[in-house]
Amino acid sequence: MSRLDSFIARVLAQRIILDHVREDLDIPVEGAVLEVGLGNGRTYDHLRETFTGRRIIAFDRAVGSHPASTPAPEDLVLGEIAETLPRFAGSAAAFAHADIGTAYRDVDERTKSWLPGALAAALASGGIAASGLPLDHPELKPLPVPDGVDPDRYFLYRRT
């Protein structure tokens, strides 16, 4: 598969997953949505439309998003995500979306060593995590992905 086809499959999977979480999964009534990896802000922009009325907090190393897709300063957490995300432990987030895989095995292995624990700690009981990387953690129960999503491309979990 070409890198272009892989990118297209990834963003289609993201949209299917985000819409599935909104339409088909019960998430806690209260709690923010966390966008782990703001990037250019396209997914953040979709989250604003998908989860209207919810606070959306985005994390990234630096601002690289389009101005129309950049969160307000109070909803943007800048710095190394491995250091900033753990500060949200106990925040009882309703949903977290993390698309910070790099396709570099060594980098992704390091990310998988801290991301599952940080997300589990930030989510409310019953909260949902969607990730482009698998999240191996005892408090994160795997959920089936919806039709149209390769189960090896995107992963869904519910925090116990």
Image (cartoon, rainbow, N blue to C red):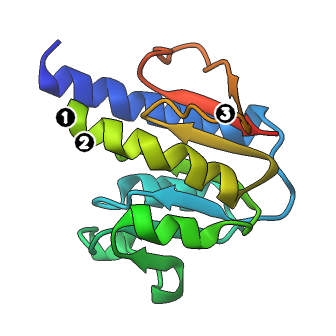
Residue holding disc 2: 107
Q: Amino acid at mark 2?
A: Val
* Residue 152, percent from left and from top: 44, 16
- The local crowd at label 2, few if under 14, some if 14 to 19, many if 20 or more residues have their Cα within 10 Å, is few
Q: CA distance from mark 2 to mark 1?
A: 5 Å
Residue holding disc 3: 157
Q: CA distance from mark 3 to mark 1?
A: 23 Å
Q: Amino acid at mark 3?
A: Tyr
Rendered-image quadrant of the N terminus: top left
Task: Write down the quadrant of residue 145 in the picture.
Answer: top right
* Residue 46, percent from left and from top: 49, 53
Task: Write down the quadrant of residue 104 in the picture.
Answer: top left
Q: Amino acid at mark 1?
A: Tyr
Left or right: 113, with 23 as reference point: left
Q: Secondary structure at mark 2?
A: helix
The residue at 70%/67% (across/down) is 54
Look at the image and tell me whether residue 49 can be seen: yes
Mark with earlier residue (2, 3): 2
Residue holding disc 1: 104
The residue at 37%/61% (across/down) is 38
Q: Secondary structure at mark 1?
A: loop
Furthest-bottom residue in view?
73
